[in-house]
Image (cartoon, grey):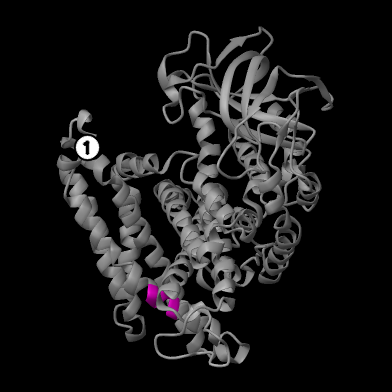
Amino acid sequence: MPTYKAPVEDVLFLLNDVFNIERYNNLPGFADATPDTLAAILGEGAKLCEEVLQPLNRVGDLEGCRRHDDGRVTTPKGFKAAYDAFAQGGWIGLSADPEYGGQGLPYTLGAVMNEFASSANMAFSMYPGLTMGAIAALLVHGSEEQKKTYLPKMIEGSWSGTMNLTEPHCGTDLGLIKTKAVPNGDGSYAISGTKIFISAGEHDLTENIVHLVLARIEGAPEGVKGISLFVVPKFLVNPDGSLGARNGVACGSIEHKMGIHGNATCVMNYDGARGWLVGAENKGLNAMFVMMNEARLGVAIQGLSQSEVAYQNAVAYAKERLQGRSLTGPKSPEKPADPILVHPDVRRNLMAIKAFNEAARALVLWTALKADVAHRSDNQGDRQAADDHMGLLTPVLKGVLTDVGFDNAVKAQQIYGGHGYIAEWGMEQFVRDARIAMIYEGANGIQALDLVGRKLPRDGGRAVMAFFNELGTFVAENAGDDAMKPFVRPLEVALGHLQQATMWFMQNAMAKPDNAGAGSHDYMHLFGLVALGYMWARMAKVALAKKADGAHMNGEAARMDAKLLTARFFMERMLPETGAHLARISTGADTMMAMPAEMF
């Protein structure tokens, strides 16, 4: 059976040493997040995930969710008690607004807890995760009455939330939505239509489920310009806050799917359900994008989470499994064979996963801190710069972390050989669960197109130029440090490849848009490699400084040596892939688009 240990020590290294979280103490909520407090919070969160959520991961996969004849859905054994423990611990409202019962701590801590929970039990983590996204959307776009009605109950965990976008005939192209909203004459609307793939759409974990639903008001313009957002509770809410009659929304069926069996993925039928407009008419996408962007960061974390838990188990297996002898002679002569960890190809896979995981975690936390600045700073310039960063990096995080996270789950499965294909070892579940992250919340091909088509040219390229400037400054400032050369020089080369690719798009994509489409996937991964390389260069700088300051005195020397070795592996064997991405981008779209449909 798989195990999991939350990487608390690595998170604290990133927050305290690499990103110096104390420098954000001017922001609301950060002054309370002292190093001791951080360690205590993350330690408690780790304990919950390791001891309560992780043992239920296999249970959820085997049992799945069950829909009953009356439309009720029950979750796997143990999920209800685990959800109650999660909610009562205050984890749903960790970073939520104190005005509505939240703790007001940094969003960054919520991102950390998201990783821990997703690694422990990805299917379970989606229930509170979707609720947090709905909270964020209502907080920004909901009316005061809506906030007072829904947020306290959602933050305390007695009510949960969902997002309802997809319909049988439309996924990415939301302009095709048919779900309609008819005014009732009392400020509410009658919502009718069918939504599919609705995660946590119906379950037995909470008293009420607050659905955020995209629909088109009668007479609204066609396409995305005529979409509105509505809040549609499973149970209507009485004026005193108590629950009233059942609303006209029900689960028609549960999808039978490849993974995340413990999460109820529902077909939701709306039959004149009462809903209330969130934000302005025909501006539903603006409101929903708050939730979608938060969800995309959450899905990026899911990619990392499955890579991390798969890695941990593969390492344990590689240290124990005896097969063959080392190419340089027996390493365990007293045993019938050596542990497979001695073999270079096993190490190649494990080092690649480790190098990705640690840099990806850094990239997530760097971006989470930007989110805190964007939402909490009183400096307009800082908020704008942070918002630019998030807009630029969100598609990179979602696309790259989930693509590579899935690949890494497969690599970890490969370490087990035939045992990795057998369910009882748990590796094949990680592979199946990781696969969905590449698809939902905007398939990764869409993320790549969003990056190249919208995020790069936005505001005259302000965000990407700021990114280039930050990395270029880092390279220039550290170029003269001999100890940093193994990290700075490869980063400089890779940054040059990214700048060349960006310039190629500027010169070749405007006149021929297919060039942008043909190169977008490679560009997204090229961008991701450069961003991960920057994270490794920053971590290496801190590791070198800590060793120079005598880290051996407090037992950190070995950890810092591991950081430096992993950083070198990334720079030597992974970052050079930027050259291949640039070469593919530069070939353009001609060959890709030349073949007639009948030749496929």
- Image quarter for residue 480? bottom left
The answer to whether residue 306 is seen in the rendering is yes
> Where does residue 41 sit, x and y in percent of width and height?
71, 63
- Quarter that holds the C terminus: top left
Q: Viewed as shown, does residue 350 lie left or right of 484? A: right
> Where does residue 148 sit, x and y in percent of width and height?
74, 32
Q: Which of 332 and 362 is in front in this view?
A: 332
Q: What residue type is labelled 1?
A: Asp
Instruction: Verify whether residue 465 appears in magenta.
Output: no
Region rendered in magenta: 565-569
Q: In this view, does 6 lie above or below 338?
A: above
> Where does residue 321 sit, x and y in percent of width and height?
56, 76
Q: Viewed as shown, does residue 524 lie left or right of 519? A: right
Q: In this view, does 551 lie above or below 516?
A: below
How crowded pointer 1 is (Cα within 10 Å; few <14, some 14-19, many 20+) is rated as some
The residue pinned by badge 1 equals 514
Q: Nearer the viewer, residue 424 or 528?
A: 424
> Where does residue 143 sit, x and y in percent of width and height?
65, 27
Instruction: Verify whether residue 567 appears in magenta.
Output: yes
The answer to whether residue 96 is seen in the rendering is no
Q: Most prominent secondary structure in the magenta stretch?
A: helix
Q: Which residue lies furthest to the front in this view?
A: 336
Q: Nearer the viewer, residue 536 or 62?
A: 62
What residue is shown at x 31% (from left), y 56% (from top)?
526
Q: In this view, does 148 lie above or below 524?
A: above
What residue is shown at x 71% (from left), y 60% (from top)?
45
Mark 1: which secondary structure?
helix
- Image quarter for residue 554? bottom right
Q: Viewed as shown, does residue 5 lie left or right of 214? A: right
Q: Is residue 49 above or below residue 66?
A: below
- Quarter that holds the N terminus: bottom right
Q: Nearer the viewer, residue 584 or 89?
A: 584
